[in-house]
Image (tube, rainbow, N blue to C red):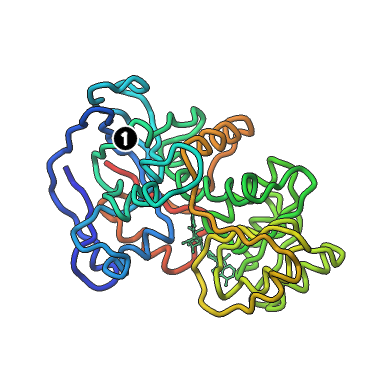
Amino acid sequence: MKAYVIAEGQGLDALQLRDRDVPKPGPGEILVRMKASSINYRDFLTINHAAARGITEERIPNSDGAGIVEEVGADVTSYKSGDRVVGCFFQDWVSGPITPKTMASALGGPIDGVLAEYVVFKENGLLPMPGHLSFEEASTLPCAALTAWNCLIEQGNATAGSTALLLGTGGVSVFSLQLAKACGIRAIVTSSSDEKLARVSEMGASEVINYQTTPDWELKVQELTGGRGVDVVVEVGGAGTLAKSVEAVRVGGTISLVGVLTGGKIDPTSIMRKSVRLQGIYVGPQVMFSKLNAALVQNKIHPVIDEVIAFDDARKAYELMQSGAHFGKIVIAMP
Ligand SMILES: NC(=O)c1ccc[n+]([C@@H]2O[C@H](COP(=O)([O-])OP(=O)(O)OC[C@H]3O[C@@H](n4cnc5c(N)ncnc54)[C@H](OP(=O)(O)O)[C@@H]3O)[C@@H](O)[C@H]2O)c1
């Protein structure tokens, strides 16, 4: 089979195609013929900085993918050949709090990922695909969509009538907007591009702010919320945007911190003074993924895909992400 690996090389040159044997599923494992894999900013970083992330041997990148069950190993009861499935980001996190053991089971990081024609998953590291989605659409769910759900609904406790601040228009933020709209949550969205802001307005954003032409966007958020601040921020920016997010959130509100897009330093005084709940989030477990999928089915939500790129041209997907021109998700389609 064909599989991409992160090998020696600078930047995206580290992404190389290899011929590998098709893996065999052991007991409790399932062999999947992959049909699509979506990329996340984390996959881009992993390819570019593998050694700094503790990867010392060739590793298959990407956490997110969907496909068709090819073969099941002994003792597998939940799946059969031909089932349409989507992988879980963590192969070893069914429910409960995250642990170092679950963290070590992240696809495309500590263990091989899914940018290959065939992949073996654990029985608890898969879910049936939501029936209304294509393989390309389902492949976008394991990281970005589940992170959005966790940030907004689980840790953010947002419900109908809550107000959320969503930064930018990448994968996590666009899913957050779709979920907010489905749940009756008012969404204020920022972007560097007026064109992208027009798109999020069409999708149901309540208010939009261009964070380049309005660098004091936290003040605008305060103004839009009558000086109260938002209930929850889906913080994809990281250190460079966090201080502004602290200003934009209400007293006692939640910042769901997931991103590392920007660098900077933050004075924590306002976090204390405003009793802000700053919650680090790392994707989510399988049981939470099931709840997300139920919500997607119930609300007939289709992920927003910017572009589908052929497997043989996979490098172009990461180049597109690097350019920042994308809106929503970038997908690689398998032959
Ligand atoms: N902890 C977790 O579980 C988890 C899970 C998923 C993602 N993440 C992290 O979350 C971040 C976003 O991931 P993603 O996959 O959604 O990335 P992505 O699809 O590449 O989206 C990046 C978007 O962020 C926006 N952005 C960049 N700089 C910004 C800034 N200074 N202020 C506001 N928005 C800014 C841009 O939107 P515009 O073009 O509209 O300006 C850009 O398109 C990454 O750091 C990623 O590593 C973490």
Q: Which of the 4 image quadrants contains residue 39? A: bottom left
Q: Is 283 located above or below residue 209 in the figure?
A: above
Q: Position of residue 254 (x, y in %)?
A: 68, 58
User: Please, is residue 55 above or below residue 269 in the view?
Assistant: above
Residue in front for this viewpoint, 57 or 328? 57
24 left or right of 11 in image: left
Viewport quadrant of the C terminus? top left
Please tell me which residue lies in front, 27 or 296. Answer: 27
* Most foreground residue, 66 or 262: 262
User: Residue 170: image x %, image y %?
Assistant: 53, 59
Q: Which residue is mark 1?
A: 122
Q: Position of residue 54 (x, y in %)?
A: 28, 64
Q: Quadrant of the N terminus?
A: top left
- Is 278 left, or right, of 30 in this rendering? right
Label 1 neighbour load within 10 Å: few <14, some 14-19, many 20+: many
* SS category of the residue bearing label 1: strand
- Say above or below: 141 vs 250: above
Residue at 25% x, 25% y is 72
**Which residue is drawn at the image coordinates 83% and 63% (left, top)?**
228
Asked where in the image residue 78 lies, by quadrant, the reply is: top left
**Disc 1 Cβ-to-ligand 1 distance below 8 Å:** no
| Residue located at (45% from left, 39% from top) | 138
Q: Position of residue 82 (x, y in %)?
A: 32, 23
Residue at point 54% right, 79% down? 264
Task: Please name the amino acid that badge 1 sits on.
Answer: Lys
Residue 317 falls in image quadrant:
bottom left
